Image (spheres, grey):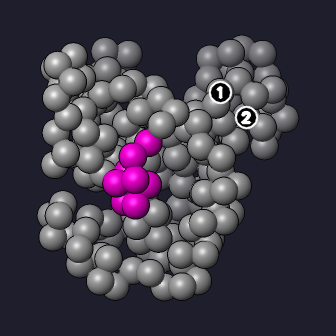
Amino acid sequence: MVEEIRKKIRRIYIHCSDSLWGDVGAITDWHVQRGFKTIGYHFVICNQFPFYLNLKENSPDESYDGKIQKGRDINEDGAHVADSWVKKNGNIPWADNEGTIAISLIGIDHFTSGQYYNLFWILQELLIATGLNVENVWGHYEFYLNNGYPKLRTCPNIDMGWLRTKLSGEMARGQRGSEKDNFIARHG
């Protein structure tokens, strides 16, 4: 899942799709419609509603819950942290895509246990592959707060202090081995 990373990574950003349904194909379409060349995120973690029809008919597809899909090539800079308001009104960086990896969870502010499980798994894999520590895992909104802007975003609508504490604990316990095998068996 995590191929060889050939560029220097300095930060991993967590996002939410701000939609109740979707998958890598839907987000690619949405981003292309907004003028991107392709999806801005490197990974998407699905919920059980990959398509609008699943949501409309309240017909969840459990095989998608927590499924990690590859988006943009991990060795390409993403297109996921930028703000036109900041660009027009600020004198500090208005984007932070170079040297970053972006993961988006499908959802708005409630995520499934399958999504969290695989978010923690892929974060551990990425932290090991890049040599980063948990302090380099930021929520999208933290770009603004850490650069002196007001809280312009709430994405990913997760308490990032909680996430980093839990991630740090899981890494300290080394909970990867058989869980990784289970992940691969379920998600290929």
**Residue tagged by mark 2?**
144
Q: Dominant secondary structure of the magenta stretch?
A: helix
Q: Is residue 25 visible?
A: no
Q: Position of residue 84 (x, y in %)?
A: 62, 17
Q: Mark 2 is on which residue type?
A: Tyr
For image coordinates 52% across by 46% down, the residue present is 14
Q: Is residue 112 magenta?
A: yes
Q: Is residue 29 magenta?
A: no
Q: Mark 1 is on which residue type?
A: Arg
- Viewer-nearest residue: 85 or 163: 163
Q: Position of residue 17 (x, y in %)?
A: 42, 31
For image coordinates 34% across by 47% down, the residue present is 45
Is the residue under label 2 in contact with that under label 1 (CB below 8 Å)? yes
**Is residue 155 rendered to the left or right of residue 42?**
right
Eye-nearest disc, 1 or 2: 1
For image coordinates 21% across by 24% down, the residue present is 58
**Residue tagged by mark 1?**
153
Q: Is residue 122 above or below residue 143?
A: below
Provide the residue span drawn in magenta.
111-118
Q: Position of residue 130 (x, y in %)?
A: 49, 71
For image coordinates 29% across by 83% down, the residue present is 178
The mark found on residue 70 in the picture is none
For disc 1, the neighbor class at 10 Å (few under 14, some 14 to 19, many from 20) is some
For disc 2, the neighbor class at 10 Å (few under 14, some 14 to 19, many from 20) is many
Q: Which residue occupies the extreme front position in the image?
A: 58
